[in-house]
Image: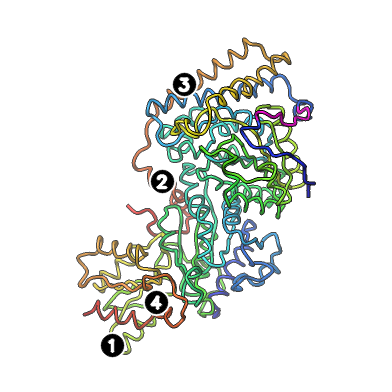
Amino acid sequence: MPAPKNTKAVTHPESLKEELPANAPEKHPVNQGLGAEEKVRLYRQMVRIRHFEQRSIRVYQQGKIGGFLHLYVGQEAVAAGTISVLGPDDHVITGYRDHGHALMVGMGMNECMAELTGKLTGCSKGKGGSMHYFAPDKNFWGGHGIVGGQAPLGSGIAYALKYAGKKGCCLCYMGDGAVNQGAVHEAFNLASLWDLPVIFIIENNGYSMGTSQARSSALAGSLAQRAEGYGMAWELVNGHDLYAVRAATADAVRRAHEENKPTVMEIFTYRYFGHSMADPDKTYRQKDEIKEYREKRDPIILWEKQLLQEGVLTKEVAEQINAEAQAEADAAAKFADDSPFPGVETITQDIYWEEDNRGAETSGRGTIVFG
Amino acid sequence: MPVISYREALRAAMREELQRDENVVIMGEEVAQFNGAYKVTEGLLAEFGPKRVVDTPISEAGFIGLGIGASMLGIRPVMELMFWSFSYVAFDQVINNAANIRYMSGGQINVPIVIRGPANGGTNVGATHSHTPENIIANHPGIKVVCPATPYDAKGLMKAAIRDNDPVYVMENTILYNDRGEVPEEDYIVPIGLAEVKRAGTDLTIVAHGRATITALKAAERLASEQNIQAEVVDLRSIRPLDEETILESVRKTNRVLLVEENKPFCGVDAQIAYLIQSKAFDYLDAPIGRVSSIDAPQIYCKKLEDVQIPNPDRVIAAALEVLR
């Protein structure tokens, strides 16, 4: 069991006022080994996420996206930093704020944008929507709409990897609001009890919808520290610093791969927009707070500065990357526009494997879809 | 043909599937060391070891969700709920995740999980442990629900469930665990979605599922010997998928219908069956459809009254005579 740490209470978003311990993450082997090209690629990936999200706002405002749209703007370094250290047998599952993770695992802007507009060319043929992206061919298992409901699934993915003897792990993301859900605690318990290679990543953006962490979570020290009660390793991470995110994730992945041990990572981050597009964002935080984060802690600006300083990026290249990402997002919006809606006949498809694959292997009979 | 119990039939199905497919894992509370709260999984740990037969903490949302997650990657977990009543604390996993992931992924993923355990009243344990949620759960597209009534069906449906690539929920009955019947030793499955005429008759169709089938058969025997009435008993076996044709064929033959279930009546399974019959065989009906279900109240503890609350042969016979009046 990891030794308890003595940490002072860390609540978010007040943590802005405190510097989180960094331990020179740029010197971590996972970052030391990063070439100039890879550093620029990480920049490009974060910029792509941002432009995709900003473009989706316009599509939403044009009335082409229904329902909920939970934006990832401000949190890009979390998805980029964590997913960039994964290998071929590592898997990802997340909650409903899933666009950043989807683009990071390699899903295309076109299929993602078309899913938002409910088109046949969407990643789930218009059946999942913003909160339910899936790409099992890219080890991405959703996209889950119910707060914390994906945590037991994440433990299950890790269980399957261990059962099959794979040297892999599962990154299981959730928001700071999820840690008060029972299913999350049940998943924590099973992960530690059975030594499962799962890494629970709390993307702490300070607010569970409109309720600040201070108003929602009882804690000793930090949310991640709840892991101590389950005998799990845990870590607090500055989510505005890509090097820090990568370093902490690499340690947790090593623990999962080498020891089959779970970890809880709490990554401090911040979302610039409301909980979803349906949130006018006027009741629970001050505009100054958002401004301060945008100016002082923006993960993309900070990474850009870092790379300019390191001499691996120039202003011109950065501008070009931004222009390309914007063009790609514009093209995705056009692709979504030009794509057809799915036909009415598709409503009753993709419900049962046994129905979709009727043949020699089918064991079921009878009526399962009522006409 | 060997005569074994319903419990042994379930166990034989799991044993054979554990042997057949290395991805099958038995998981649940007390299934391994304790040999099963109802001894359904007795001996499986000794035979297959702790990798294949796994005790879980009392943590239904956690372990059911874990099983669903593992099944997305190809593990075929057979999860025991000590009671289906306990599924209520895991409902988000049982419904939202297991039923919807295939659909929401546009058919990219399937969830080959089995959740099994007793779903019945009649055991004098009070309301919290006596739920019959087959109606609630079968309401959700994406899930299959089967309710075996006999040892033969218990084994055949369990094997079909484990081989099925969709979530199949097997609702057993503790009162039936000791019932004995002929079960072949050779490999067979009962296809999911196939009803069976358990007793042929000409005067009246009784549609039932689970233990209500046994009650209906007892009532049918008495109707025959005491009243010279030949009732046909259709055992649904599977709630979803539903074998509409076998029901309708019997109705077209007898022209009179009595629906029997241990479920509570409001929005029960038989409400759906009654709708089906009136919409597809209305012209064949010579009388209004009759119905016997559990009396519409939370399950009562008092055993004397619980035996009245759940359908018994006397109530079935009285209702049958009403339909035949």
Task: Report the chain holding disc 3.
Answer: A
- The x and y percentages for residue B242 are 38, 61
- Which residue position is annotated with label 4? B309
Q: Disc 4, disc 1: CB below 8 Å? A: no
Identify the residue at horizontal 61%, vertical 71% (top origin): B37
In front: A274, or A130? Answer: A274
Task: Report the chain holding disc 2.
Answer: A
- The x and y percentages for residue A342 are 38, 37
- Which residue position is annotated with label 2? A349
Residue at the extreme top:
A316
Q: Please determine whether, in this image, residue B266 is positioned above or below residue B93.
A: below
Label 2 residue SS: loop
Label 3 residue SS: helix
The mark closer to the camera, 2 or 3, is 3
The mark closer to the camera, 2 or 4, is 4
Q: Is residue B190 magenta?
A: no
- Which residue position is annotated with label 3? A331
- Which residue position is annotated with label 1? B227
Q: Amino acid at mark 3?
A: Ala
> Which quadrant would residue A319 be assigned to in this image?
top right
The mark closer to the camera, 4 or 1, is 4
The mark closer to the camera, 4 or 3, is 4
- Side (left or right) of A344 relative to B49: left
> Which quadrant would residue A65 be assigned to in this image?
top left
Question: Distance of mark 2 from mark 3, alpha carbons?
Answer: 29 Å
Label 2: how many Cα within 10 Å (few below 14, some 14–19, many 20+): some
